[in-house]
Image: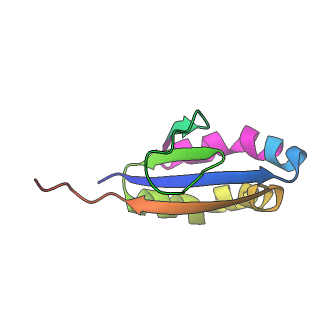
Amino acid sequence: MPAYYLFDVREITDYDMMNRYRKAVLATVEQFGGRYLAVGGEISIIEGDWRPEFPVLIEFPSAKHAREWYASPEYAQIKDLRLRGTRGCAILLDAAPFAA
């Protein structure tokens, strides 16, 4: 089953770090079978009071692939750029099969 990282970039605090991160992150995501599904875009609140600022949705073939990417030496080299250059939140959603 696929798994999804949802990052919500609430604020960019260092644009230089984020530019360096953006230039390097795609190669690491693809190395682990991931692909970007959404980067930003218009947000329509349908229910509740959650107000994402700048959502980024990345799909991986499985939670195993997703966790391996996040913990990989390749991503570790640039992850700190995002963590120090932004303020935000992230979740990993391990998709469960839908049973009707």
Q: Residue drawn at (59%, 52%), measured in percent from left and top?
A: 51
**Going by the picture, which residue comes out furthest to the left?**
100
Q: Nearer the viewer, residue 34 or 51?
A: 51
Q: Nearer the viewer, residue 77 or 94?
A: 94
Q: Does residue 39 belong to the magenta stretch? A: no
Q: Nearer the viewer, residue 42 or 56?
A: 42
Q: Is residue 33 visible?
A: no
Compared with 1, 64 (above or below) is below
Q: How is the image coloured?
A: rainbow
Which quarter of the rendered picture does the N terminus lie within? bottom left
Residue 15 is left or right of residue 2, and the answer is right
Q: Residue drawn at (62%, 40%), measured in percent from left and top?
A: 26
Q: Residue drawn at (69%, 62%), measured in percent from left and top?
A: 76
Compared with 30, 97 (above or below) is below
Q: Residue drawn at (62%, 53%), measured in percent from left and top?
A: 8
Q: Which residues are magenta?
A: 20-35
Q: Is residue 51 visible?
A: yes
Residue 76 is left or right of residue 62, and the answer is right
Number of marks drawn: 0
Q: Main secondary structure of the magenta part?
A: helix
Q: Position of residue 4 (x, y in %)?
A: 44, 53
Q: Position of residue 56 (x, y in %)?
A: 58, 45
Q: Does residue 32 belong to the magenta stretch? A: yes
Q: Position of residue 15 (x, y in %)?
A: 87, 45
